[in-house]
Amino acid sequence: MSNRQPAPEKQKWHKQLRETYSVASEHVSLLSLKLLLVFAITFSAIFGIGVALNLMAFFTILAVGLSLLITLIVFGRIAERAIYASVEDQLGAAASVLQSMSPRTGFTTTPAVGVDKLQNIVHRVVGRPGVILVAEGSRPQQLLTEQKKIHARFAPGVPIHEIIVGSSGVQLRHLRKELKKFPKALRPAATTELRRRFSALPANQIPIPKGPMPTRGKTPRR
């Protein structure tokens, strides 16, 4: 018999939406009213065009569809900012964002490869640009420098990039964008080999903030 575990059941879209709304409403006052206002303004503008062209039936249907779409887009943007704000100052917030990235982006994250007594943390991201060390904490520079030397010994000749997340560096909501700015330096086969090399190293684990994390192009989900 196979010992293969069944894949976890995907969360239904309406549960994702409800969870995301719950988090966003805690950080955005009058969220329902703002979304209703977006829908009403969009509907009124499109319906007004239909009245002017004497095509009210067609434009009414069009207005409902487009108004719902635009409202969802606005909600996604608002929710994304709210969700990032909800984990901004939590230990492991950067790791939470990094691990929420789709595998299709080509990045693999190992959280907390370095931790010091001041709760500064360094996470390792491996991808086509090479190794990206992402640090968070009050004063992570010394830990980041130490980890860069360690990783250089295990991956000689591989580009090693640094990112500091926080008030002195990159904002949490811009972290994904920063990762994608680095130029591709490794071929896919070399990236795979690099992942295997690092997979043999021990990795510390830290608690990751719970809750939905935004995914680009979709309503934020867990």
Image (cartoon, rainbow, N blue to C red):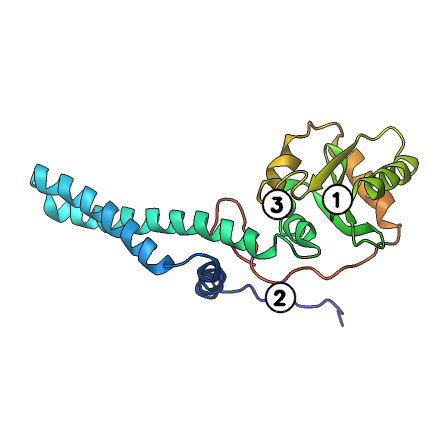
**72 with respect to 83 (left or right):** left
Q: Residue 172's mark?
A: 3
Identify residue type, mark 3.
Answer: Leu
Residue neighbourhood size for the residue with mark 3, other residues' Cα within 10 Å, grouped as few (<14), some (14–19), many (≥20): many
**Which is nearer the N-term, disc 1 or disc 3?**
1
Position of 184 relative to 196 (above/below): above
The one nearer the camera, 119 or 60, is 119
Identify residue type, mark 1.
Answer: Ala
**187 with respect to 29 (left or right):** right
Q: Tell me the SS state at disc 1.
A: strand
Q: Tell me the SS state at disc 2.
A: loop
**142 with respect to 19 (left or right):** right
Query: What distance separates the C-alpha of mark 1 from that of mark 3?
Result: 11 Å
User: Is the residue under label 3 in contact with that under label 1 (CB below 8 Å)?
Assistant: no
Residue neighbourhood size for the residue with mark 1, other residues' Cα within 10 Å, grouped as few (<14), some (14–19), many (≥20): many
Query: What distance separates the C-alpha of mark 2 from that of mark 1?
Result: 31 Å
Q: Which residue is mark 1?
A: 135
* Residue 160 coordinates in the image, percent (x, y): 80, 33
* Quadrant placement of the C terminus: bottom right
